[in-house]
Amino acid sequence: MDNLDNKPTDFLADAYANAYPETRPFWEAAEKDELLLKSCHDCDKPHWYPRMICPLCGSANTGWLNASGQGTLYAFSHIEKADPPYTLAYVQLDEGPIIMSNIIDAEVGQLKIGAPVTVTFQRMKEGRKMPVFRLSE
Amino acid sequence: MTIKNKAYIVGAYEHPTRFAPDKSVAQLHAESALGALQDAGLELKDVDGYFCAGDVPGGSPISMAEYLNLNLSWLDGTEIGGCSYIAHVERAAQAIAAGKCRVALITLAGKPKSTGVATGTAPRTLSPERPETPWDLPYKPTITGIYGMITQRHMHEYGTTAEQLAMIKVAASHHAQYNENALLKKVVTVEDVINSPIIAPPLHRLDCCVITDGGGALIVTTPDIAKSLKRPLVKVMGASHTIKTSHGGYIAPTETGAIKTGPEAFAEAGVTPNDIKYASIYDNFTIMVLMQLEDLGFCKKGQAGQFVAEGNLISGTGKLPWNTDGGGLCNNHPSNRGGITKVIEAVRQLREEAHPAVQVKNCDIALAAGPGLVVGEGHAHATLILGRE
């Protein structure tokens, strides 16, 4: 994980955030360590990754939803050979969607499918903050 | 409009190289094209349709058409990853059935081996314009890491074991020992696979395909031209290709696009999985063979582990002879794209031109299938059913 929290930057300089100006509320919330989801006012389902048109029903009547930040570990693979090692994961959010992420601050032996996890945020080298997860207390 | 029996594969050529530092990608495409035309008994001037994917120099049909000086009336640059060339056979058959071209050339080539690309384990470089990129790239989703998660999930849901997956590699190695061009010719055991280094748990090194330079080409043509040539007749019976999306985050990582392309291709061909005498199934990782066997309908979901553990993929003894060239796991994975070699070995089997040690007796109907890009994210899948006439 490229955690460069000491670097004086934010999402405004991040090419990956800037390519999607419509997702700015997500990056602004992430600065405050809050996870937003895009949800559809017509079919009432949240989706991932955030889009302005609901991928589940095609409605443009979508809005931002404050997510609980809670989920369960759906699958993971700990890449020991990487430098530094890291854990790639699918996390199923309590709101429904399964999102790709990383699990941090955990011994690999502690991880198992179904384990409760809680969101936290890490700043990427490009500037934006992204949700990652820890095993819940 | 059905393509059933409207087109024939008359040329199939797998470039023998597995390491080509002294040749350009364009030359590998061209050599593969000439190899397939020679196999068919046709010439470059006969080609009036050209099909290629993202591996082609310049990224579109234009540069190779220029390089080969083709005189085209139809072209198709559909790029859907490693299964592009399986889909190209269907698309060529459609164009031929519609009268848009008469001799279709499909090419693939690349040289990841000599350019040192650690394809499956290196962090991927993806542009911001790919809409998933801001949301997945930061997590370092290596291809092996994603397939590791899929494998873990299949084990969790269905009780699949590492030993069962290893038997897929064992079957591939049994076949590769007879292929003089195969990169890995050594027969391996379940223990060899289990004891190979972990790349992305639970996947071992020997659960992963090889990285090779190389290329391949196919010639698809009309029934009239096919019957005027001297080659055994291999007809296109049915086909399908699709994109299986992540469904807005409600993904099913243990399902492949074969759940759609399999039934559609079988329906068009008018046959069932029981009719298939030989199957080429894209084997970028052992888990992908397992999941496709289930999704194509050869096994019920969750039961392919037992099916492969019984040795059913080994030609001569198993119920479903599979990847008799050694597949991507042992033979060849040119340009990190296994689609075209799957079609080529199916054609060899239908012509009775496979190695005698792996040739399937009375092989009259064969299948070639594979995914494109990475299952677990939006990915493509293509299935093709071919018959000997």
Image: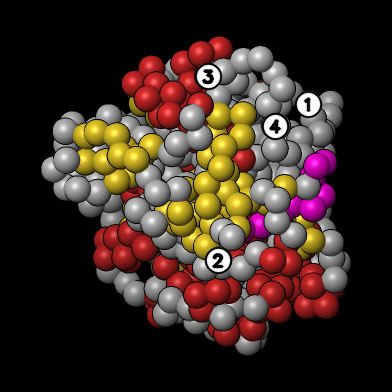
Residue A90's label in the rendered image is none
In the rendered image, residues at marks 1 and 3 fall on the same chain: no
Q: Position of residue B112 (x, y in %)?
A: 74, 35
The subunit carrying tag 3 is: A
The answer to whether the residue labelled 1 contacts the one labelled 3, judged by CB atoms less than 8 Å apart, is: no
Res B57 → quadrant: top right
The subunit carrying tag 1 is: B
What residue type is disc 1 on?
A: Lys
Residue identifier under label 4: A3
- Residue at 65% over, 40% down: B140
Q: Residues within 10 Å of mark 3 (few under 14, many from 20)?
A: many
Residue A115's label in the rendered image is 2
What residue type is disc 3 on?
A: Phe
Residue identifier under label 3: A11
Q: Nearer the viewer, mark 1 or mark 3?
A: 3
Front residue (pair A48, B294) = A48
Q: Position of residue B303 (x, y in %)?
A: 50, 81
Res A21 → quadrant: top left
Q: Position of residue B2 (x, y in %)?
A: 23, 52
Q: Residues within 10 Å of mark 1 (few under 14, many from 20)?
A: some
- Residue at 70% over, 37% down: A1
Q: Residues within 10 Å of mark 4 (few under 14, many from 20)?
A: few
Q: CA distance from mark 2 to mark 1?
A: 51 Å
